Image (cartoon, coloured by chain):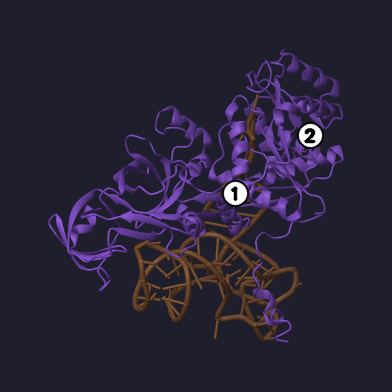
Amino acid sequence: MERTAPEALEREKHRKTEGLGELPGDTSSIVLRFAPNPNGPMTLGHSRGLSINSEYATIYQGKVVLRFDDTDPKVKPPILDAYDWIEEEYEWLTGKTPDVVIRASDNMNLYLKRAEEMISDGFGYVCRCSVEDFRRMREEKNDCPCRNRPVSDSLSDWEAMNSGIIAEGDAVVRVKTSMALPNPALRDWPALRILDAPHPSVQGDQYRVWPLLDFQSAIDDHGQGVTHIIRGKDLMDSTRKQTLLYDHFGWTYPQTMYWGRIKIHEFGKISKSEIKAAIEEGEFEDWDDIRLPTLSALRRRGFRGDVVRDYWIDLGITQKDISTSMQTIEAFHAKRIDPLTERRSFVRDPVTLTLEGSGGPGPELSIPKHPEGTVRGCRDWTVGDTVAVQSADVTTTRIRLKEYADIVVSGESALVESWRRTDGRPVVQWLPSGMGREAVLHRPDGRLISSEIGLLEDFELEVGEIYQLERVGFAILEELPDRGPAKLIWLHR
RNA sequence: GCUCGUGUGGUGUAGUUCGGUCCAUCAUGCCGCCCUUUCGAGGCGGCGACCCGGGUUCAAAUCCCGGCACGAGCACCA
């Protein structure tokens, strides 16, 4: 048995379920959706939702609808460029293009039509109560006066809403559930409201009445044939509200799964509108400022989309509220890119030493691009009489120039004691004079960006490439100008 | 306040459906040692958890009851 079926001896209970769990319901032809608001580019938080939806689509060979939920031109005005940003970031993260791309704002006619149907059927009504009044009635489980008016009254108000006779804020369309429901969130919930605000992707002012999320996404999920919704558990009541609406229309609600709240230690709550305001105040350069938890910032720093995606899949989905840290993501990322990343020497705050000693390995030195050889090839150095080392490294006198020589430093000169490693003295990275070019390493440092000036090994450098700076960490080469220092952006250690 | 959800080591998870094989899985983290051409990685060893209280039972992380904690919804935001 051991030989034929060793796995049968394993305890069934302890076998870890690999990757994501199974999806409920009929999975023969699944349609998932990812529905961001294009009021900014995606953040780290979005990437979790997208990663998981996209991965499920891959597992079950289903489809993903990328739907821009952009029906609030007032409180969350869409940024026209963000539609493209998000599509690009979608590809960067998932390695695929969405199967369908839809803008909710293109479906306005459909929402209005469904709303009118709902009112005609007596399952919705136009409510002209003030927010405060309705809040009180909801708390006290009392029907509002608009609720039991004849359908024809609601319909004429509906027309008045659309034509501009009723002012913004003076009427709302509600779904007629019940005011006696134990869960107050479900009591006659609002479905559409009036908004006098221009929409950047809708021509002119042809619409005044806009759907709220719960109504809009319910109509869309049905229209787009969504079979499974995987979303944050803060939307659990949305499921319940929408199920009531589906029941009315005679539709079957999709299967739903939830994930808990996620918090990243370093960033806390991520708010696109707060980031936007901070950018406008000049606190950050732009959306891809390296201090920001946006996908564009991570991408700029050299993170790989597929690795970020795999990280989220690795975490899995549970309804627990979880917190993780950039450290953990970075450790995961470092492990993945390490075998692919060439080494380079970066000597910060360099001091020049004159070597004394003879009979060395000669003026040519060949150092592997990767110590394990996972990247083939070597970096060829020409070594003269002088070398550069970090000032911080010469606080001790006995050091080893990595891959080269054991030395004793004394002032501005250094005596070569041995070419081979003979003891446990600290190994430091260094550069032959002439092999380095000026570079500045920019590093996010809380609310600031620190920059470190140094010499970067000038060997087969390519813009956009990630290097592991020996003894420093991973960084991406962002600029390599003909004149002036090269620009390195910190990735992680 | 009402409603919903979640509680397993520092972090993330497995196990909870159908109680035993769980003095609890795996990963990461942390500590020590080894190796080493940086940092890592790798090898070896170690640390560390079932929210609390009752109950049922020969037996509870798992079932029941009662607490507690945390989070979310109750927006003319998504």
Residue pictured at 32% horizontal, 35% vertical? A484
Q: Mark 2 points at which residue?
A: A176
Say which element carries label 2.
Answer: loop
- Quick one: which residue is furthest to the left in this view? A411
The amino acid beneath tag 1 is: Arg
Q: Where is residue A384 in the image (x, y as percent from the top left)?
A: 24, 54
**Colour chosen for chain B:** brown
As rendered, which of A152 and A438 lies closer to the eye?
A438
Q: Name the spot of residue A479 as percent of width and height, x first.
A: 41, 38
Q: Position of residue A463 (x, y in %)?
A: 45, 42
Q: Mark 1 points at which residue?
A: A48
Q: Can residue A142 be seen in this view?
A: no
A340 left or right of B22? left
In this rendering, position of residue A4 left or right of residue A338:
right
At x 47% / y 57%, what residue is drawn?
A: A334
What chain is the purple one? A
Of pointers 2 and 1, the one earlier in the residue sequence:
1
Of tags 2 and 1, which is closer to the observer?
1
Q: Residue A280 carries which label?
A: none
Q: Quadrant of the C terminus of chain A?
A: bottom left
Relative to residue A148, is residue A162 depicted above or below?
above
Q: Residues within 10 Å of mark 1 (few under 14, many from 20)?
A: many
| Residue A125 vs residue A410, the one in the foreground | A410
> In the rendered image, which quarter contains the N terminus of chain A?
bottom right
Count of numbered badges drawn on the protein: 2
Q: Mark 2 lies on which chain?
A: A
State whether residue A401 is above or below residue A212: below
